[in-house]
Image (cartoon, rainbow, N blue to C red):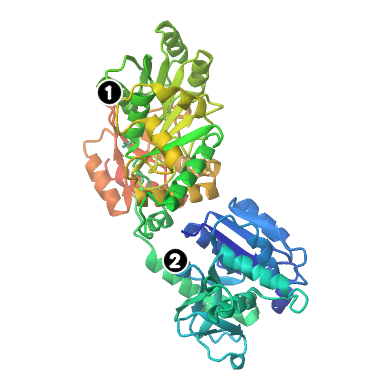
């Protein structure tokens, strides 16, 4: 797995004349974005967690870009005018944390398939190459019979033979980069403006000839008809615009997965890159490499709910209900539990507690109004409860419970709090420390926008330590054992859902890029579009607006005899929308969720469909 990338972006780009006098080459635009931003987005979609950009000329442009993409780290080459690309690359290489990285030039447009090919190439060091481009600026590559790099030049005559053209995207090990850096430093006097491809060629040739370690031999991966263009002058830019960029777009279209807009409350719509993240090399999950992936996932998830130094994330291969069951069966000990039930998921907490014969009481409250916090607080104290369980966002109705208020009160009275945040996490901003939540459940397939199959329990460290000696009521769903086993071994107790976790990793990269705050803004914008249409159609909503989560809306069914949920559902599916029935016994509703990788334009389209259906009813 490749987790880091370097983009060399310090160069002056003098051949593009006045276009790049006050702007780096990477900011030439194609379509709606600068070319380097296309590249950043492709790297993100390919599962890169961190991008180091080596800057120089007009570095302030990259500083702006880095504000938009939190995964970008900048390295400034102050000698950019006097060094070549290798001078920038060696500064970036020092900052790498991973054992291997993708190395890219900044002035490229390319088909993302090239990244997939390099990531999946079995060789540790390999550079991407193509057949003839006739661009007039080719960097030709010479290879030996095993396709190992022997040399490069812009002049064919300088090479023994020409095998392919350098694209400007490579996969290199950290050791190889370090050896290239050493080579560059050794030639600081005689080759002060060394390009990185010269360092690659020198190192690889020496390795092939047996002069240095064999591991520094660099393979060439040639894709004969690869769609790519390096843009160094006006004619390249023109060629990119007219020919290559349209080809790249077409290739991407070919790989697009059929779009289904899921307006059910999860599993939510996912991006294609999350879907494709599941297509990865097979691995035994007991390998250290996979343990590191899970560790990364847990750390990042903890950061989303209060920080990894205070919160521990524990993963189970299961659905969200399992995370609820883990908390109820593992976290109550000899205590007494009060459960708030104002919807199907609060009720489920009660069923779980009953199935374990736990001492508990269910506090029932209407699903249609905010619960009476004063009465709940009183009951907590009067009943001598040690634990409180409630649902953050009651998906049944779209009601947002007053979790911070009740949990803060509980903290003051030494009551442990257990929260189902299955449909709140990764949309509603939650800080478990500030909100005084001790244990909290969620799942991979809702607002985090991953695939179904991973349940997560977030735990405040202090609260987690306390359950160590609690009775083991469930074998598989035991929180302490699952946690401590992973801490000790870097492995889960039982087989984890490997591909689902790869998708979750990708979903986290994308959530960090969007940010949870912006994600909630996007969801809210979709909700506003829906609510506007609901009002225009004179339909009513089950809940008053101020009690709503803005994540799911329960809409009262029209009382026309012509209305049929099934028909509405089936017609919606024909247009790529999936809607959901209501779940209350005392109100006839249907539900529209606005979570997942959905766009405002899609919600607009849905409201047009909904209006057509409703107006047809009379
Ligand atoms: N809790 C809440 C609040 C939910 O919304 C859901 C599912 O919609 C669940 C629990 C159960 O999750 P799962 O169906 O993954 O078991
Ligand atoms: Mg170049
Ligand atoms: Mg160039």
Q: Secondary structure at mark 2?
A: helix
> From mark 1 to mark 2, how far is it between C-alphas?
47 Å
The residue that appears at 38% across and 14% down in the rendered structure is 335
Q: In the picture shown, does residue 566 fall above or below 280? A: above
Q: Is residue 40 above or below residue 305?
A: below
Which residue bears the numbered disc 1?
351
Classify residue 215 as left or right of residue 387.
Answer: right
Examine the rendered structure and indicate whether residue 611 appears above or below residue 22: above
Residue 563 lies in what quarter of the image? top left
Give x and y (percent) for residue 216.
Answer: 55, 72
Q: Quadrant of residue 98?
A: bottom right
Residue drawn at x 42%, y 39% is 486
For image coordinates 38% across by 40% down, the residue present is 593
What residue is disc 2 on? 116
Density class for disc 2 (Cα within 10 Å; few <14, some 14-19, many ≥20) is: some
Give the camera-side residue of 471 and 438: 471
Q: What x and y, as percent, mark residue 305?
A: 52, 35
Task: Using the rendered image of the protein, determine whether residue 594 is visible from the camera's viewpoint.
Answer: yes
Residue 56 x %, y % = 73, 64
């Amino acid at each position: 797995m490749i987790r880091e990338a370097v983009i060399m972006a310090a160069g002056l780009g003098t051949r593009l004349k006045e276009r790049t006098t006050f702007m780096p080459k990477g900011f030439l635009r194609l379509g709606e974005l600068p070319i380097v931003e296309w590249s950043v987005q492709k790297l993100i979609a390919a599962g890169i967690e961190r991008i180091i950009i080596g800057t120089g000329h007009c570095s302030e442009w990259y500083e702006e870009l880095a504000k938009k993409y939190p995964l970008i780290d900048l390295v400034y080459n102050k000698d950019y005018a006097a060094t070549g690309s290798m001078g920038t690359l060696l500064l970036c290489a020092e900052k790498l944390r991973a054992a291997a990285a993708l190395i890219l030039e900044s002035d490229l447009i390319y088909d993302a398939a090239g990244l997939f090919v390099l990531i999946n190439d079995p060789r540790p060091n390999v550079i991407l190459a193509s057949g003839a481009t006739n661009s007039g600026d080719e960097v030709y590559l010479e290879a030996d019979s095993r396709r190992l790099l022997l040399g490069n030049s812009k002049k064919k005559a300088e090479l023994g033979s020409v095998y392919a053209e350098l694209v400007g995207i490579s996969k290199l090990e950290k050791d190889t980069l370090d050896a290239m850096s050493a080579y560059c430093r050794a030639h600081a006097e005689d080759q002060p403006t060394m390009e990185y491809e010269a360092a690659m060629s020198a190192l690889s040739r020496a390795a092939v000839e047996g002069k240095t370690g064999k591991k520094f031999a660099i393979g060439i991966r040639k894709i004969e008809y690869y769609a790519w263009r390096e843009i160094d002058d006006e004619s390249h830019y023109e060629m990119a615009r007219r020919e290559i960029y349209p080809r790249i777009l077409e290739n991407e279209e070919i790989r697009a997965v059929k779009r289904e807009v899921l307006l059910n409350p999860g599993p939510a719509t996912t991006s294609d890159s999350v879907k494709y993240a599941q297509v990865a090399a097979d691995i035994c999950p007991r390998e250290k490499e996979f343990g590191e992936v899970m560790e990364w996932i847990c750390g990042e998830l903890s950061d989303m709910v209060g920080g990894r130094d205070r919160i521990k994330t524990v993963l189970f291969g299961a659905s969200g209900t399992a995370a609820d069951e883990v908390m109820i069966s593992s976290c109550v000990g000899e205590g007494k539990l009060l459960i708030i039930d104002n919807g199907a998921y609060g009720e489920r907490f009660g069923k779980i507690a009953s199935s374990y014969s736990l001492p508990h009481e269910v506090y029932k409250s209407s699903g249609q109004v905010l619960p009476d916090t004063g009465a709940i607080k009183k009951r907590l104290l009067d009943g001598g409860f040690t634990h409180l369980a409630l649902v953050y966002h009651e998906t049944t109705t779209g009601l947002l419970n007053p979790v911070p208020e009740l949990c803060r009160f509980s903290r003051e009275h030494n009551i442990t709090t257990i929260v189902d945040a299955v449909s709140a996490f990764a949309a509603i901003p939650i800080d478990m420390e500030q909100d005084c939540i001790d244990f909290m459940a969620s799942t991979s397939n809702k607002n985090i926008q991953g695939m179904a199959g991973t349940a997560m329990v977030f735990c405040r460290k202090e609260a987690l330590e306390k359950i160590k000696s609690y009775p083991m009521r469930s074998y598989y769903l035991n929180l302490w054992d699952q946690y401590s086993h992973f801490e000790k071994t870097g492995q889960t107790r039982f087989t984890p859902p490997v591909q689902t976790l790869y998708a979750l990793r990708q979903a986290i990269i994308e959530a960090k890029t969007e940010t949870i705050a912006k994600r909630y803004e996007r969801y809210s914008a979709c909700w506003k579009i829906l609510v506007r249409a609901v009002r225009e159609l004179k339909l009513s909503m089950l809940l008053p607006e101020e009690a709503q989560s803005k994540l799911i809306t329960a809409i009262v069914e029209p009382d026309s005899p012509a209305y049929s949920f099934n028909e509405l559902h089936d017609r919606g599916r024909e247009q790529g929308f999936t809607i959901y029935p209501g779940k209350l016994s005392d109100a006839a509703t249907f539900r529209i969720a606005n979570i997942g990788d959905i766009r405002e334009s899609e919600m607009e389209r849905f409201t047009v469909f909904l209006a057509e259906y409703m107006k047809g009813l009379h």
